[in-house]
Image: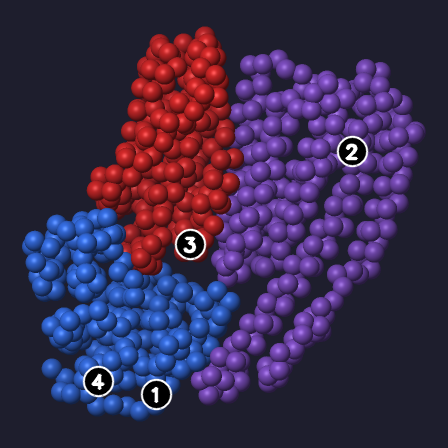
Chain colours: A purple, B red, C blue
């Protein structure tokens, strides 16, 4: 990464000194791996594994739906842990705030995918797009909670203020989702409705292997996205830091003072 | 700490007494919401009676959001935010005071809405203890969540839209549980509502604790 | 003796903008320091910084022995600030406001009464909602709150603005009394003649930095 320009330069320099691609050896490996794994997953899901006894070909959606749940909730948990680490004075580093931001954004996308695949699967198996079962309902609320978190992150504010606000929001959101899950589960025991979890097929043998592989695939894919997003956040911060240094210099020039020590 | 909280609550309630926003503006709106439900359900009395508990809590949600918005719009004006930080009041005491004032205003609104539901939806009260318990715990849980996000969005210009977005998902399980508790209390079903009251109590306790801890940091960042 | 205010190359951000970009200032106890400078120079931010309201991101800053970089909250109960805003609840009466802000700062009822009388806020006026007061009257009430707080450091942003000449004389007297009682006064003003006669020292604030251009002798320190 190039170093910021010296404060003595007074002409507004373009961002090019800190603009850099967010790719690296690590991301190229992750990216390539994702592509390959995705190809294999598609093969496994659509061709190699058998259809389900009960659901028929529809079960193949599971290889897309279940991994997205895993990533959606996993990213959420990661964002919450990162937020906690940021708030805890001993472990406070900007790094954790960036992790929280990156995982939350990627998590939001995967939550949307999760809901979409879930609705498709539901349409095919029970004929309706939606059931108010525990999993779908909690995931829907998770999606809205994510959107709220992203809205808080986008509020214009000083970086430290924004990070702290978002971190607190994330932690309260975790508590909220646990409460939601518990209440909705309980609510569901009152109605014996068809649920995606109830109709989760018995997964053994080849299907289990394929499912685990697709879980791994989506994890690699999400990691690749998260690393890129993290670096993008870091670049944005560097650009803002540069802008601040420039503003300080100009301000001091107004006062007739020299360059800051 | 409790003295400071009482000071804040008294200030808020005095303000409401003098400006009468909750009684003159929010209350009529909440009752109007009940009327709108009747239109939406085509005055189907059977349906309205069965849906009564849920509709009550939806109306409370509407009114509650307005009460919370109002409670914090007064703190966002005229440099009062700075003055509060300088005031010497403990943040957790301020949280408690705000919680009490919003809770009291909500309870008044809920009493009026209850009368409305009984009248308009032809609902009968069969278990008043359950009704009161569910209302109180549900209100505390709602108010606690409202205060947390209210103070978070204190200096924010898009507060009117951000606050509901943040509050509603947090309050959804409260509405769920409170409606389930109201159903047996209003004679709609024969299930046990007290389990749900227990859940409401836990939620209220959790959010109050979270609020006591986070009010200070969130007030700083306005 | 340790200076009451000691800033050394302090940098304070307002949003992303460096309102103070390296302010250096030392103020001894009992001084009445005038901050002069053009609009946008950072006088208000400097005052807010001394009140512990804004984070200092670089340099050193200590007020009343408290390091502002690590713990600015603890300085707040000991300072009193009069800003551009009224910092009063519009819908509450003068008495309501005084009761709230005074008690919050730990003042007793007699002390609050004394403050109101000192600022010549008549008994009849105390029952009037703040929204119905003139700008000058609101200033007096805000000053009464400040007086009731008995702060060790007075921070005033254009204290004479909006007051008639009687009110301005009153402000001058208050500032002199305060520093005679051991408090320190920092105030920003554009009215150099009047301010110059009250201040013991004057400092120019330009471009987010405070520099002493010349030391001015005030009138007799009374």
Q: Secondary structure at mark 3?
A: loop
Q: Gap in Å between the C-alphas at discs 1 and 4?
A: 18 Å
Q: Is residue B192 visible?
A: no
Which residue is the site of mark 1? C212
Give the label, 1 or 3, closer to the camera.
Answer: 3
Kindly identify the residue that appears in the image at 31 percent across and 57 percent down. Answer: B78
Q: Pointer 2: what residue?
A: A64
Q: Quadrant of residue B127?
A: top left
Which label was assigned to residue B155? 3
Alpha-carbon distance for marks 3 and 4? 37 Å
Q: Residue at x 59, y 42 (%)?
A: A146
Q: Measured from the top left, where is residue C77 in percent x and y?
A: 27, 60
* Label 2 secondary element: helix
| Vertical relation: B20 (above or below) A101 | above
Q: Secondary structure at mark 4?
A: helix
**Left or right, residue C48 beside residue A47:** left
Labels 3 & 4 near each other (Cβ < 8 A): no
Q: Is residue B190 left or right of residue A97?
A: left
Determine contact: label 1, label 3, CB under 8 Å: no
Residue depicted at 79% across the width and 55% down the height: A27
Chain to which the residue tagged by mark 1 belongs: C
Mark 3: few/some/many CA within 10 Å (<14, 14-19, 20+): some
To the question of a shared chain for discs 1 and 4, the answer is yes
How many angstroms separate mark 2 from mark 4 (CA)?
Answer: 77 Å
Count neighbours of disc 1 (C-alpha within 10 A) and say few if under 14, some if 14 to 19, many if 20 or more.
few
Name the residue carrying label 4.
Answer: C193
- The one nearer the camera, A208 or C185, is C185
Q: Are the residues flagged by discs 3 and 4 from a single subunit?
A: no
- Asked if labels 1 and 3 share a chain, the reply is no
Is label 1 in a helix, a strand or a loop?
loop
Residue B75 image point, x, y percent: 33, 50
């Amino acid at each position: 990464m190039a170093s910021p320009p010296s404060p003595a330069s007074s002409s507004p320099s373009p961002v090019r000194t800190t603009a850099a691609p967010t790719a690296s050896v690590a991301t190229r490996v992750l990216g390539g791996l994702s592509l390959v794994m995705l190809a294999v997953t598609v093969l496994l899901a659509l061709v190699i594994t058998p259809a389900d006894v009960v659901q028929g070909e529809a079960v193949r959606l599971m290889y897309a739906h279940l991994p997205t749940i895993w990533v959606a909730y996993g990213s959420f948990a990661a964002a919450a842990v990162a937020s906690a680490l940021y708030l805890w004075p001993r472990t406070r580093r900007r790094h954790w705030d960036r992790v929280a931001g990156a995982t939350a954004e990627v998590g939001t996308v995967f939550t949307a995918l999760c809901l979409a695949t879930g609705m498709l699967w539901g349409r095919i198996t029970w004929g309706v797009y939606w059931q108010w079962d525990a999993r779908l309902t909690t995931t829907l609320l998770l999606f809205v909670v994510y959107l709220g978190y992203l809205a808080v992150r986008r509020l214009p504010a000083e970086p430290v203020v924004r990070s702290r606000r978002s971190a607190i929001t994330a932690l309260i959101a975790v508590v909220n989702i646990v409460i939601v899950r518990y209440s909705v589960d309980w609510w569901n025991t009152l109605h014996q409705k068809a649920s995606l979890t109830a109709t989760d097929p018995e997964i053994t043998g080849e299907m289990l292997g394929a499912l685990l592989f697709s879980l791994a695939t989506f994890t690699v894919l999400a990691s690749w996205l998260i690393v890129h997003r993290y670096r993008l956040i870091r670049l944005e911060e560097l650009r803002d830091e540069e802008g601040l240094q420039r503003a300080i210099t100009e301000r001091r020039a107004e006062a007739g003072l020299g360059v800051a020590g | 700490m409790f003295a400071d909280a009482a000071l804040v609550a008294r200030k808020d309630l005095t303000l409401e007494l003098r400006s009468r926003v909750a009684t003159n503006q929010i209350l009529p709106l909440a009752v109007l919401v009940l009327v709108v439900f009747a239109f939406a359900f085509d005055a189907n009395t059977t349906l309205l009676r069965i849906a009564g508990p849920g509709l009550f809590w939806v109306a409370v949600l509407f009114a509650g959001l307005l009460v919370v918005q109002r409670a914090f719009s007064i703190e966002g004006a005229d440099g009062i935010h700075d003055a509060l930080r300088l005031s010497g009041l403990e943040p957790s005491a301020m949280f408690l005071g705000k919680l009490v004032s919003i809770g009291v205003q909500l309870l008044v609104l809920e009493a009026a809405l209850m009368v409305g539901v009984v009248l308009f939806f032809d609902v009968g009260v069969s278990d008043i203890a359950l009704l009161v318990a569910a209302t109180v715990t549900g209100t505390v849980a709602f108010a606690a969540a409202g205060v947390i996000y209210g103070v978070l969005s204190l200096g924010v210009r898009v507060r009117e839209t951000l606050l509901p977005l943040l509050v509603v998902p947090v309050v959804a399980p409260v509405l769920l549980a409170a409606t389930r508790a109201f159903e047996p209390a209003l004679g709609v079903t024969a299930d046990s509502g007290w389990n749900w009251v227990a859940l409401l109590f836990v939620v209220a306790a959790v959010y109050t604790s979270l609020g006591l801890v986070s009010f200070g940091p969130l007030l700083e960042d306005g | 003796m340790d200076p009451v205010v000691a800033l050394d190359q302090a940098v304070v951000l307002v949003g992303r903008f460096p309102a103070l970009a390296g302010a250096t200032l030392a103020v001894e106890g009992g001084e009445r320091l005038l901050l002069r400078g053009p609009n946008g120079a950072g006088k208000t931010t400097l005052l807010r910084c001394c009140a512990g309201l804004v984070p200092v991101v670089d340099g050193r800053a200590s007020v009343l022995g408290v390091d502002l970089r690590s713990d600015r909250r603890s300085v707040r109960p000991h300072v009193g600030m009069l800003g551009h805003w009224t910092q009063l609840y519009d819908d509450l009466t003068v008495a309501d406001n005084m009761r709230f802000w005074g008690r919050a700062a730990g003042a007793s009822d007699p002390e609050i009464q004394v403050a109101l009388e000192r600022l010549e806020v008549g008994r009849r006026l105390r029952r009037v909602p703040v929204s119905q007061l003139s700008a000058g009257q609101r200033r007096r009430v805000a000053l009464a709150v400040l007086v009731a707080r008995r702060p060790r450091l007075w921070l005033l942003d254009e204290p004479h603005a909006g007051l008639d000449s009687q009110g301005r004389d009153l402000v001058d007297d208050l500032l002199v009394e305060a520093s005679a009682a051991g408090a320190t006064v920092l105030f920003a003003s554009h009215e150099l003649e009047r301010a110059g006669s009250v201040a013991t020292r004057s400092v120019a604030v330009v471009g987010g930095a405070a520099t002493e251009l010349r030391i001015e002798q005030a009138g007799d320190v009374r």
